[in-house]
Image (cartoon, rainbow, N blue to C red):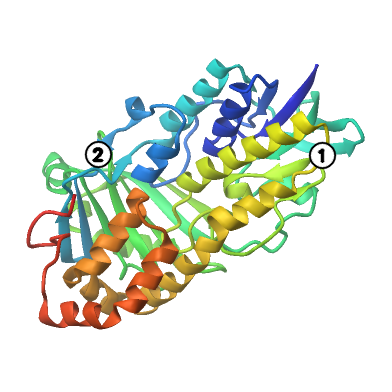
Amino acid sequence: MIYDAIVVGAGPAGAVLAHQLATRGLRVLILERTRLPRYKPCGGGVTLKTVRSLPFDASSVFEVQAEAGRLTYRGRTVAKAVLDRPAAWLVMRDRFDQFLAERAQEAGARLIESATVNGFEQHSGGVTVRCRQGQTFSGRLLAGADGVYSVVARAVDLLPGRNVGVALEAEVAVPDAARAAQGAEATFDFGALPHGYGWIFPKRDHLSIGVFAAQPGKAPHIKAYLRQFAASQATLREATWLTVRGHLIPLGGALETLHRDRVLLVGDAANLADPWLGEGLYYAVSSARIAADVIAGALDAGRVDLSAYTSRVHAEIVRDFRYAQRLSRVVMGFPRLCSAFLSRSSLLQEGIFGVVRGDETFGALYHRLKRQIPKVLLQAVVGRSGAAGWDRGRAAA
């Protein structure tokens, strides 16, 4: 059988791409190297803009709705906001990713698990994909959704010098009193390590915690930073460590080519995560939907030209990352000062919640703050609370 598209990887980008192609009546094959469900090291934050971009309802696998955000600096609470309307939910990626893959299968895509792609050839009629287990598959087009270590990208020499940050994530069990104290709050600490942050995300029966170094290069002391972060947080002082996993997070922002001949890359494989907070799920879904449009259009036209995919991702995603980079340099370069500003400035608070919800882009936030720097500084100096109400009320609806 010759498939219209072969998708390598059954994570969010691959599953949504397969779903969108299958709903168009195309023959789609997903090759996944593991068996689902599988553990995925990830904080598991699903923002409102991600929920809005999914082509189906995924609320059945949400574990906790974030009802508040807490900002700490080296363990000391700087600010807290209680949310009047949803901004994010917390999930376990094994259940979330399996749910997305099941939706793709329901739409008509075929999923083969334990299929490790180790090479492919492009030819005039399409692509032939080889798996380590001995299978071969033929398709007209190929999508690499196989993460930051993408075999597909390496095979066609795409993103050879990609920028990535390092994260270390743990699942921890804590006493009932500590879980109650954490509640449905998501905690962020920009003093947890240089040029990065620590996080605590509550799940149904435990807490997910981690640290992220949001700059390229190695992070040799990241284990020590994670332990130090945990020791600084009251809810983690009696934690039992269940799993600890490291992983790389894309630092998006480079205008790189994301296609070659019959091949394109989506999600982490295309290095699509914001370079400030490292959020990638929204961009996995967004790039998958763009890819589905371009692939369907190319197949309908009967010619292989995927250049529109790179152009659209640059215009709709990557150019906005440039502003996230600028914001990251300021916040990560001056974490204590910026944490203090955030606790006092309604403009900063409203802007960050706007980005998380999808009501505002990084570019819009950057330009608005640039125009209103005097007002931001005034609010920070006089301690005026604003609509977001950190420590002094409830967040703006």
* Rendering coords of residue 11 (x, y %): 54, 36
Answer whether labels 2 and 1 touch (C-beta < 8 Å): no
Quarter of the image where one finds residue 114: top right
Quarter of the image where one finds residue 248: bottom right
Q: Relative to 4, is 107 on the left or the right?
A: left
- Crowding at dot 1, Cα within 10 Å, few <14 / some 14-19 / many 20+, comes out as some
- Crowding at dot 2, Cα within 10 Å, few <14 / some 14-19 / many 20+, comes out as many
- Residue nearest the viewer, comparing 20 with 367: 367
- Residue nearest the viewer, comparing 246 with 315: 315
Q: Earlier in the sequence, mark 2 or mark 1?
A: 2
Give me the C-alpha separation between circle 2 and circle 1: 43 Å
State the mark number for residue 304.
1
Asked if one can make out residue 242 in the rendered structure from this viewpoint, the answer is no
* Rendering coords of residue 238 (x, y %): 20, 50
Element type where label 1 sits in the image: loop
* Rendering coords of residue 268 (x, y %): 57, 48
Q: What residue type is labelled 2?
A: Gln
State the mark number for residue 65.
2
Element type where label 2 sits in the image: strand
- Residue nearest the viewer, comparing 173 with 265: 265
Quadrant of the frame with the N terminus: top right
Please name the residue shown 47% across and 68% down the image: 323
How many marks the image carries: the answer is 2
Please name the residue shown 18% across and 82% down the image: 378
269 in relation to 257, above or below? above
* Rendering coords of residue 134 (x, y %): 80, 25
